[in-house]
Image (spheres, rainbow, N blue to C red):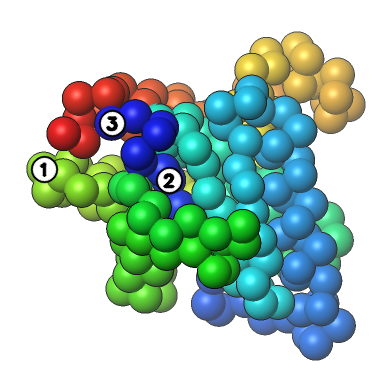
Amino acid sequence: MTNKTHYAVIAGELAPGARVSDEQFSKIPDLIRASFQAVNRLVPEEGKLKYEIIRMDEFLALSESPAHSLRSVIMLFSAFRFLSYRELGERVELRISEGIGPVEFAQEHLRESDGTAFRKASSGIGKMKRHQRISITCPVKAINEEFALTCSFMDILIHDWSDEQAEALFLNLTGKNQMEISELLGISQPAVNRRLKAGHFDTVQKFILRFEHILHPDSMQ
């Protein structure tokens, strides 16, 4: 797989079950936008996500480097969790479907584009059950079977994050160590460690590294 022929397309929306007022709901687009901006500000160039909000609580995003896309997606989950809680005082979540493949009909705007990756992302989010938070689909059946299993475990972890755990995870995924995070958050290093352990950072990191490993150039052939 090469970035010239394959992309990662992300279809996302506010997860069902959120209990927000109309006033709170009106803030969701700005919170989604702020979450993308937080990710793009801190990831390397290959991890940046081009994005468009297509309705109040729905969005599309595209990564030109599929192997680097998942770290950015997990950071997006965590950024939205702690930013939305800070703004709304309520627990709200995203759910995301990632489709990997060619984009045969690329346009300037993502909402006007089409192709295999877009259709996989759209189909994936349409099939997600109420409790699911993440789905990944690529052109290789054997890899999809692995994604289905690992994503089912990630559903549990993402759903259980507190806003404090999500913020610590977000900062650690940018490469900051625990002392740096403690200084940024104004808490002790042991407190950071407890948040990362409670958020199962080691498992999240293994999930990302496994994804990056299997999406090597020959995987999609």
Q: CA distance from mark 1 to mark 3?
A: 15 Å
Relative side of 200 to 61, left or right: left
Disc 1 residue type? Ala
Q: Secondary structure at mark 1?
A: helix
- Report the mark closest to the observer, 1 or 3: 3
- Please state which of residues 128 and 155 is positioned toward the viewer in this rendering: 128
Task: Check the picture and name the quadrant holding the C terminus.
Answer: top left
Q: Secondary structure at mark 2?
A: strand
Q: Identify the disc placed on residue 86.
A: none
Q: Residue at x 62, y 61 (%)?
A: 109
Quadrant of residue 127 in the image?
bottom left
Disc 2 residue type? Ala
Task: Check the picture and name the quadrant holding the N terminus.
Answer: top left
Q: Residue at x 76, y 79 (%)?
A: 25
Above or below, comparing residue 13 to residue 3 in the picture: below
N-terminal-most mark, 1 or 3: 3
Residue placed furthest toward the left: 142
Quadrant of residue 178 in the image?
top right
According to the image, label 2 marks what residue?
8
Q: Position of residue 175 (x, y in %)?
A: 64, 17
Q: Residue at x 62, y 36 (%)?
A: 48
Q: Residues within 10 Å of mark 3 (few under 14, many from 20)?
A: some
Q: Is residue 121 visible in the rendered structure shown here?
A: no
Q: Identify the disc placed on residue 142.
A: 1
- Please state which of residues 85 and 96 is positioned toward the viewer in this rendering: 96
Q: CA distance from mark 2 to mark 1?
A: 18 Å
Q: Residue at x 55, y 78 (%)?
A: 17
